[in-house]
Amino acid sequence: MSIVNSIRSQLVPINAEGYPFIGAFALVSLILFWIWTPLGWIGTVLTLWCVYFFRDPPRVTPVREGLVVSPADGHVSLVQPAIPPAELGLGNTPLPRVSIFMSVFDCHVNRSPLSGRVERIVYHQGKFINADLDKASEDNERNALVITTPSARIAVVQIAGLVARRILCFVREGHALTAGERFGMIRFGSRLDVYLPEGTIPLVSIGQTAIAGETVLADLRGQDGDRVYRID
């Protein structure tokens, strides 16, 4: 039993949303093996990629009050002031925005950037242009959450990309989120925008690699003191 537990501890967990896709890819691979062996091996490779795509590894989240962590894995594609989408109700003043682009090779599980209550969730239909482009924030299909804390309100927006066709949200309005908690995912390649309170200075740069639930995007306190961490 200890050997089995040891093996399991080395395997990366798979998000439950991925099992239907993994099962479908595996079934198609078996059929392809019956038709022609080389096709079966191609299907096997695609099945393994599907397993990799839906991985959901545990993360160690800094939970000190005021820290805003990345909601997604990927690279920081934009760091600039921008007017939030109108449906968020955050006003017409440009706010600091950090955009994180997720390729098809990144983990697509989205995590809450800080602890707070989900004040608003708004889904907006739109296009499916390249999520790495600035105009994707306004034109693409998206799902936005406004999260409130006793001292601040921030927004995190799930944006569909060129390949993505499904935005998933696991929480509802009124839900109390903790920093690093899973709140959704996007299939298959997309972007997340985080709108910070006015005057906040982002602590990341364009091109930097971000890790969901771990990379600190900003400190709402304006300082970076001792941190406490939680594994999830």
Image (spheres, grey):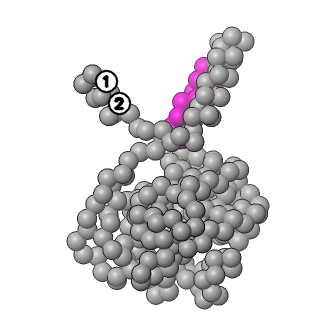
**What x and y, as percent, mark residue 133?**
66, 65
Amino acid carrying label 1: it is Val
Amino acid carrying label 2: it is Arg
The answer to whether one can see residue 231 in this image is yes
> Which region is colored magenta?
41-54
The residue singled out by tag 2 in the image is 8
Q: Residue 98 shows which numbered tag?
A: none
Asked whether 67 falls inside the magenta stretch, the response is: no
**What x and y, as percent, mark residue 54?**
53, 41
Q: Nearer the viewer, residue 70 or 168?
A: 168
Q: Nearer the viewer, residue 130 or 185?
A: 185
Residue at image point 64% right, 81% down? 89
Residue at image point 54% right, 68% down? 174
Residue at image point 33% right, 74% down? 65
Q: Magenta stretch: dominant SS?
A: helix
Q: Would residue 201 be found to the left or right of residue 45 on screen?
A: left
What is the distance, in whole Å, between disc 2 and disc 1 at their CAs? 6 Å
Badge 2 crowding class, 10 Å Cα cut-off, few under 14, some 14 to 19, many 20 or more, is: few
* Label 2 secondary element: helix
The residue singled out by tag 1 in the image is 4
The correct choice, above or below, for 100 with respect to 27 in the image is below
Q: Nearer the viewer, residue 176 or 204?
A: 176
* Label 1 secondary element: helix
Query: Circles 2 and 1: CB distance less than 8 Å?
Result: yes
Q: Would residue 211 be found to the left or right of residue 108 on screen?
A: left
